[in-house]
């Protein structure tokens, strides 16, 4: 079995890297599905996909950057 040594992310960069990783994956998948379902695999599929992905990522990353820490705090709260 191949072992991959992934370096640990420094604590100050963790929120940015978490948001970036989730935003890249989420926007890629949703954009791909949305474009392929609505327009099909036409000659301009790649151009439509890239253009839409840039727009969705530009909204998705900042939203996740501000939402994820708040959700973490909410989930880590002690219940009474």
Image (cartoon, rainbow, N blue to C red):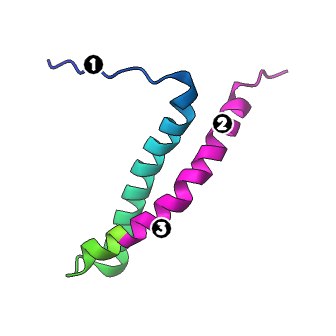
| Residues at marks 1 and 2 touching, judged by CB atoms closer than 8 Å | no
Q: Whole-percent x and y of residue 72?
A: 65, 32
Q: Residue 58 lies in magenta, yes or no?
A: yes
Q: Which residues are magenta?
A: 51-80
Rounded to the nearest whole Å, what is the CA distance between mark 2 and mark 3? Answer: 23 Å
Rounded to the nearest whole Å, what is the CA distance between mark 1 and mark 2? Answer: 27 Å
Rounded to the nearest whole Å, what is the CA distance between mark 3 and mark 1? Answer: 33 Å
**Tag 2, which secondary structure?**
helix
- Residue beneath disc 1: 5
Which residue is most to the left?
1
Q: Whole-percent x and y of residue 68?
A: 62, 40
User: Which residue sits at x=15%, y=20%?
Assistant: 2
- Residue beneath disc 3: 55
| Placement of 14 over or under 50, stated as above or below | above
Question: Which of the 4 image quadrants contains residue 74?
Answer: top right
**Tag 3, which secondary structure?**
helix
**Tag 1, which secondary structure?**
loop
Label 2 or label 3, whichever comes before in sequence order: 3
| Residues at marks 2 and 3 touching, judged by CB atoms closer than 8 Å | no
- Residue beneath disc 2: 69
Tell me the tag on residue 58.
Answer: none
| Quarter of the rendering occupied by the N terminus | top left
Question: Which of the 4 image quadrants contains residue 3?
Answer: top left
Q: Whole-percent x and y of residue 7?
A: 36, 21
Q: Whole-percent x and y of residue 61?
A: 53, 52
| Quarter of the rendering occupied by the C terminus | top right
């Amino acid at each position: 079995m191949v072992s991959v040594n992934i370096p640990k992310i420094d604590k100050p960069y963790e929120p940015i890297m978490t948001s970036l990783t989730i935003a890249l994956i989420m926007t890629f998948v949703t954009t791909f599905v949305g474009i392929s379902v609505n327009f099909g695999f036409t000659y301009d599929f790649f151009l439509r996909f890239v253009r839409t992905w840039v727009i969705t990522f530009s909204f998705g990353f900042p939203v996740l950057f501000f939402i994820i820490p708040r959700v973490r705090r909410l989930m880590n709260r002690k219940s009474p």
